[in-house]
Amino acid sequence: MAAFKLNSVLRRQLFVGRVAIVTGGATGIGGMITNELVTLGCRVVIAARNEDRLKEFATTVNKNTGHDLVYPIRCNIRKEEEVSELMSKTVKQFGKIDYLVNNGGGQFASQTEDISAKGWHAVVETNLTGTFYCLKHVYDKYMKKHGGSIVNIIADIYKGFPGMAHTGAARAGVENLCKTLAVEWAKNGVRINCVAPGIIYSETAEANYGQKGMFESQLYRIPAWRLGDTSEVSSVVCFLLSPGASYVSGNTVYIDGAQHLYKSTYEVEQHSNYPPPNYPTTEATTPKSKL
Ligand SMILES: CCCCCCCCCCC/C=C/C(=O)SCCNC(=O)CCNC(=O)[C@H](O)C(C)(C)COP(=O)(O)OP(=O)(O)OC[C@H]1O[C@@H](n2cnc3c(N)ncnc32)[C@H](O)[C@@H]1OP(=O)(O)O
Ligand SMILES: NC(=O)C1=CN([C@@H]2O[C@H](COP(=O)(O)OP(=O)(O)OC[C@H]3O[C@@H](n4cnc5c(N)ncnc54)[C@H](OP(=O)(O)O)[C@@H]3O)[C@@H](O)[C@H]2O)C=CC1
């Protein structure tokens, strides 16, 4: 019992004196990461486009904890000058950036052939280029000299991402960038990892797909037979940021109830449009072509 008490005290102090930036840190997964970091004693700069939502979230957390630990800065990660300013303002305000969580991002569901050039660029610029800007500027403004720990939130891209090709390509780019930087920036004391959430319920995430119950309708594709909740992502993110993961870099952790090993969210309808096989087929085993 005494040992447990000590651990819980240590746990509360794990990130005392530390400073983190969480992009998209006022909603869904990012909001829970902010909450957990604050619980562990960290000061957190939250950055996103919707300034009212950032301010409201910061005010609520600061009121609940009785400490000014959350600080909102408006930033569209697609704009390099805003990202550069985010890093400079954080260093000016707090003197350091120990942790960066690249969580801000998203996409829309679409067959690849229906994605317009503008839609493709919006998703790739948000998820890949926006993440690159954050990495480049946190390194330039702080981590090159002082080291730090970074976690990128990507997505379940284990089997590609049928139905969301733009984000699949962008997140695969982030995962590869992570592997490169784990090597290039090791000499600067920077660790960098990715987490790949499966289907994680939050009101904002589900609203993006336009229909309540959309996430629940996917349960049969998940071996765990339930959705993930945001705290099941934030705990892994905090572990990867922490000294507990001091020898872990360049990795991806899937948080998906084993879905990446099972069914994707995409249905392939029955067809007979592939080149024919060399084994004998019957009419019963050959579906009619719809072409
Ligand atoms: C039908 C089957 C669905 C299965 C669903 C269940 C599967 C669950 C899988 C869960 C995996 C992942 C979950 C999540 O990531 S949850 C997080 C969700 N949150 C977000 O995505 C929020 C952030 N998203 C955005 O900001 C936008 O989606 C976007 C990345 C596109 C950026 O938008 P931005 O505001 O910057 O850009 P615009 O809105 O101006 O759009 C630019 C062009 O993009 C095209 N577009 C945008 N939205 C859509 C859409 N809903 N459908 C089609 N095309 C879209 C479009 O070309 C835009 O230009 P125009 O407006 O001029 O046409
Ligand atoms: N929930 C899920 O099932 C999964 C989520 N993910 C990923 O996890 C991350 C968090 O998603 P989740 O919390 O679920 O959903 P949310 O929609 O709640 O979060 C997305 C966040 O990203 C921010 N954001 C989007 N575009 C930008 C931008 N250009 N600049 C700065 N911030 C931006 C949004 O804030 P604002 O609009 O104010 O800019 C918002 O806070 C996203 O990258 C998402 O794609 C991946 C796989 C599954």
Image: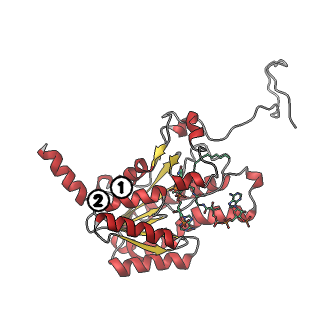
**x, y (%) of residue 183?**
44, 60
In the image, 4 versus 255, the foreground residue is: 4
Mark sitting on residue 150: none
Occupied quadrant, residue 4: top left
**x, y (%) of residue 188?**
37, 68
For label 1, being within 8 Å of ligand 2 is answered no
Report which residue position mark 2 lands on. Answer: 40
Q: Say whether residue 208 is visible.
A: yes
Q: Say whether residue 189 is visible.
A: no
Residue displayed at 33% across by 77% down: 94
**x, y (%) of residue 238?**
36, 55
User: What is the quadrant of the N terminus in the image?
Assistant: top left
Residue displayed at 55% across by 47% down: 156
Comparing labels 1 and 2, the label whose residue is closer to the camera: 2
Element on which disc 2 rests: loop
Gap between marks 1 and 2 measured at Cα: 9 Å
Report which residue position mark 1 lands on. Answer: 238
Report the side of 136 relative to 17 (left or right). Answer: right
User: What is the quadrant of the C terminus in the image?
Assistant: top right
Residue displayed at 37% across by 59% down: 35
Residue displayed at 29% across by 59% down: 40
Please state the total of marks drawn on the protein image.
2
Query: Which three-letter amino acid code belongs to the residue tagged 1?
Result: Cys
**x, y (%) of residue 166?**
66, 56
Query: Which three-letter amino acid code belongs to the residue tagged 2?
Result: Leu
In the image, 164 versus 170, the foreground residue is: 164
Q: Which image quadrant shows ligand 1?
A: bottom right
Q: Is the C-beta separation of discs 1 and 2 under 8 Å?
A: yes
Mark 1 or mark 2: whose residue is earlier in sequence? 2
Report the side of 244 relative to 10 (left or right). Answer: right
